[in-house]
């Protein structure tokens, strides 16, 4: 997407000074995906393709209903289907194994502390707007793949055609003009909600109460704090085991390797290089050259 | 002619033409790969990508320049690795290295073609270049787009560490050449004066001239 003037920028990749932040009262938004209400119809995928005008190539089948089988440069959201056996509490601590078909709408989680943005070396190629949406500004993308390295959710995909990185924009263009994301609008069961993050948490809690009444004792909201919380949240029937939902990470956070690389090491490296040049210069000025002795 | 004057006809050959051309090719590739790489390391250095036609071009060119630099260094390595093996006198030299840095060259033990400092520089260059190539492949998006993400993460950390190590080593290497007068000629003309050789590499001087001047 391209940078939207109607949205203020809270974080900007490869930028060491503050970004325009005068409209800092913008409320944080969130998309809430209620997995328990999803029927896996893929209307959201279609709406995403239609609004963003992207067409993934016809692929192959991997034995599940997933189509395409993975996120891609032109597939920014994909339904994941997991058949799992889950132990469930029924009638006072009596455990019973049941087969469950868990369907999760996969895509960018719009982390509050985005690993992609932290890793990106190109100034302004990744921005986080004041409302929490993380967006790739494609014309500044240099195609290095560092966002792939930094993302804790394995979301960005680099196109082999244009070497640009792509992912869900949370329809930042629609949200910027007061509309809800295309997937939210298309969902026929009301499984996808959009609003302020506070409102979404409030709605999630009513869903969780309902699920708990129906026997899902571990129902909860997925808003992982390891990445500062996310602006795409899930209501999960089994919030204690996010891994059941096609390997959703239990406690995602930016890898310590990435933190080391784009955190401490970065200024230290520059300091060391400048230091070496400075020390060399002053060594010469203090000690003087070793002169060439002339010979007979 | 004064006895102490420099007679170019008596200069000693230190590097042949091929070695020198290879060295300077490596120098250009070092700056190419180095400056384009630094652009990706720290935001304050991203402007360096302009030298290569912008971000995408830096990203495209960087790995090829780096790989070519490492390949050319293999030629350097094959020619020089034996001369850079550490020997007993190097330990002695290192113990006295402080005096050398203070500008007191007189007490340094007599050494051959390379002193311990140069040898360490050689091995650091070889080691960091090998690391740079091995780890750079792990996140070379154009050719290896589907490697596991954990390998990319390990790759970027080791790659930047090796890069910084190489830059510090090369800085030392360049500084030493500027500091010890008469040295750069070895790489621009291939020749050094007898005085230079006797003062800085006495055992090598004896080896190439066949004379033992220490008794003179």
Image: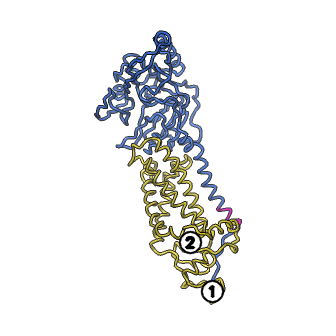
Chain colours: A blue, B yellow
In which image quadrant can residue A41 be found? Answer: top left
Residue A269 x/y as whole percent: 59, 50
Residue B215 placement (x, y as % from top left)? 66, 85
Q: Residue at x 54, y 57 (%)?
A: B166
Q: Is residue A278 left or right of residue A11?
A: right
Q: For residue B184, which numbered disc appears in the image?
A: 2
The residue closer to the viewer here, A78 or A248, is A248
User: Is B61 rendered above or below residue B104?
Assistant: above
Query: What is the secondary structure assignment of the residue under circle 1?
Result: loop
Query: Badge 1, how many Cα within 10 Å: few under 14, some, many 20+?
Result: few
- Neighbour tally class for label 2: few under 14, some 14-19, many 20 plus, Cα within 10 Å: some
On the same chain, marks 2 and 1? The answer is no
Residue A192 appears in the picture as rendered:
no
Whether residue B169 is situated above or below residue B186 in the rendered picture: above
Spatial distance from mark 2 to mark 1, Cα to Cα? 21 Å
- Which stretch is magenta? A280-287
Q: Nearer the viewer, residue A24 or A104?
A: A104
**SS at circle 2:** loop
> Label 1, on which residue?
A296
Image point (55%, 42%), residue name:
A15
Question: Is A292 covered by the magenta stretch?
Answer: no
Quadrant where the N terminus of chain A sits is top left
Whether residue B138 is situated above or below residue A86 in the rendered picture: below
Q: x, y (%) of residue B182?
A: 59, 75
Query: From the image, which quarter does the C terminus of chain A lie in?
Result: bottom right
């Amino acid at each position: 997407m391209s940078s939207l003037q109607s949205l203020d920028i809270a974080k900007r990749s490869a930028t060491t000074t503050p970004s325009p932040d005068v409209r800092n009262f913008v409320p944080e938004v969130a998309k809430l995906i209620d997995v328990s209400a999803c029927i896996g119809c893929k209307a959201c995928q279609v709406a995403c393709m239609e609004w963003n005008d992207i067409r993934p190539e016809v692929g192959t089948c991997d034995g599940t209903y997933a189509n395409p089988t993975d996120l891609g440069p032109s597939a920014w959201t994909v339904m994941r289907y997991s058949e799992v056996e889950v132990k469930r509490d029924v009638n006072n601590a009596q455990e019973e194994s049941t087969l469950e078909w868990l369907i999760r709408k996969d895509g960018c989680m719009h982390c509050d502390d985005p690993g992609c943005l932290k890793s990106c070396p190109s100034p302004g190629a990744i921005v986080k707007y004041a409302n929490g949406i993380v967006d790739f500004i494609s014309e500044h993308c240099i195609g290095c793949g560092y966002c792939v390295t930094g993302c804790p959710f394995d979301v960005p995909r680099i196109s082999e055609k244009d070497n640009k990185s792509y992912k869900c924009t949370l329809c930042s263009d629609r949200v910027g003009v007061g509309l809800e994301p295309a997937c939210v609008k298309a969902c026929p069961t009301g499984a996808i909600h959009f609003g302020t993050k506070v409102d979404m948490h409030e709605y999630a809690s009513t869903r969780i109460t309902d699920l708990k009444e129906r026997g899902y004792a571990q129902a909860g909201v997925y808003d992982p704090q390891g990445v500062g919380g996310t602006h795409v949240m899930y209501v999960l029937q089994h919030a204690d085991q996010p891994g059941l939902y096609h390997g959703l990470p239990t406690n995602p956070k930016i890898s310590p390797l990435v933190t080391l690389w784009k955190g401490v090491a970065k200024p230290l490296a520059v300091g060391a290089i400048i230091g070496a040049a400075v020390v060399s210069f002053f060594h010469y000025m203090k000690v003087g050259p070793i002169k060439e002795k002339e010979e007979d | 002619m004064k006895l102490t004057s420099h007679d170019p006809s008596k200069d000693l050959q230190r590097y042949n033409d091929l070695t020198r051309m290879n060295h300077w090719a490596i120098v250009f590739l070092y700056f190419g790969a180095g400056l384009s790489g630094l652009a990706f390391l720290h935001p304050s250095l991203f402007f360096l990508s302009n030298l290569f036609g912008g971000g995408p071009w830096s990203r495209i060119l960087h790995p090829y320049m780096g790989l070519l630099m490492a390949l050319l260094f293999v030629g350097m390595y094959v020619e020089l690795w034996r001369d850079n093996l550490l020997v007993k006198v190097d330990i002695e030299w290192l113990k006295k290295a402080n005096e050398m840095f203070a500008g007191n060259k007189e007490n340094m033990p007599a050494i051959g073609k390379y002193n311990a400092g140069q040898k360490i520089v050689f091995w650091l260059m070889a080691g960091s270049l090998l690391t740079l190539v091995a780890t750079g492949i792990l996140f070379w998006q154009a050719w290896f787009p589907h490697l596991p993400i954990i390998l990319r993460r390990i790759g970027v950390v080791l790659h930047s560490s090796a890069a910084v190590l190489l830059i510090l080593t090369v800085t030392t290497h360049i500084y030493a050449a500027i500091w010890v007068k008469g040295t750069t000629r070895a790489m621009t003309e291939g020749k050094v004066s007898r005085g230079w050789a006797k003062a800085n590499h006495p055992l090598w001087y004896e080896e190439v001239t066949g004379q033992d001047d220490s008794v003179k």
